[in-house]
Amino acid sequence: MLLNGKTGLIVGVANKHSIAWAIAQSAAGQGARLMFNYQNERLKENVEELVATMPGAKAFPCDVGDDAQISTLMQQVQQEVGSLDFLVHSVAFAPREELTGRFVNTTRQGFATALDVSAYSLVAVTRAALPLMSNGGSIVTLTYLGAERVVQHYNVMGVAKAALESTVRYLAHDLGPKNIRVNAISAGPIKTLAARGVSGISKMVDHHKEFAPLRRATEQGEVGDTALFLISPLGRGITGEVIYVDGGYHILGSLVSME
């Protein structure tokens, strides 16, 4: 029971297919008590049904684009569990129209939205959580290969993920003296609710299965177990890193077109 007696906050569960939910299952399976958020009323029922399956877990409303809601969330979490040992950030968004066509046509507002929700929210949530992590801890976020290579249709989200990965490094530097580790997991393409906004996601998954060294799609549970490693004492010497869970796809030197 690697996380027995530990408490964590999982930000970004939308439904049972969410990577964040897979992480929650891995953490709960090792003894962690978990708190969750739900973005809005539309997602509330889905999240609360899932949370009800975990003893001691609770969910609170919070849109990470609103600092006041983040502050309220942390107050509620503190009242419920007192402190946090780990935080999982699994949030990304760009307007659907920005994820089709050419990147050069990205709008100013679309760019700002993608960077705010997908990258700055990690800074905002981390800052608000710091008073609850006085004994150190671990923070994990989710990224994708589109941060460092051009992936068709990923467009502005790739730029946002690049900013997220840089944010991980700067936060790791800032928080290391507090014994708080900050890392990212770069998962292969998975058909989550958020990923459906990317044009051609099914082709991306099929392409990945054909060419990744392990010749199969990335599974949510694989990402969940890697996050478990990072938030547990087993990952105590790792910070500021991007760990790939993509069947080895990122090592390929020549990527075949998905058109």
Image (cartoon, grey):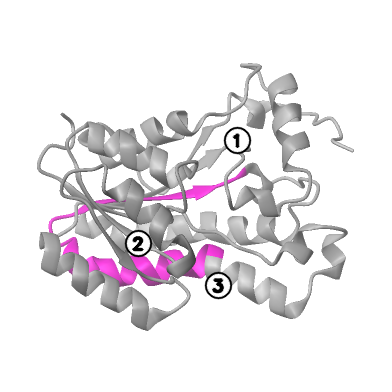
Q: Magenta residues, as a range?
A: 118-144
Of 256 and 68, which appears nearest the observer? 68
Magenta span includes 126: yes
Residue 150 is tagged as none
Residue 177: x and y in percent read 23, 58
Magenta span includes 147: no
Residue 250: x and y in percent read 65, 32
Of 222 and 175, which appears nearest the observer? 222
Q: Amino acid at mark 2?
A: Asn
Q: Dividing the picture into quarters, in which one does residue 216 lie?
A: top right
Mark 2 to mark 3: distance in Å?
Answer: 18 Å
Q: Which residue is mark 1?
A: 188
Q: Residue at x 34, y 46 (%)?
A: 50
Front position among marks 2 and 1:
2
Q: Which residue is mark 3?
A: 116
Q: Which residue is mark 2?
A: 37
**CB contact under 8 Å: marks 3 and 1:** no
Among numbered discs 2 and 1, the one appearing first in the sequence = 2
Residue 93: x and y in percent read 60, 62
Q: Give the crowd class for mark 3: few <14, some 14-19, many >=20 residues within 10 Å.
A: many
Q: Give the crowd class for mark 1: few <14, some 14-19, many >=20 residues within 10 Å.
A: many
Of 60 and 185, which appears nearest the observer? 60
Q: Amino acid at mark 1?
A: Gly
Q: Amino acid at mark 3?
A: Asp
Among numbered discs 3 and 1, the one appearing first in the sequence = 3
Furthest residue in direction bottom, as rendered: 68
Element type at marker 3? helix
Element type at marker 2? strand
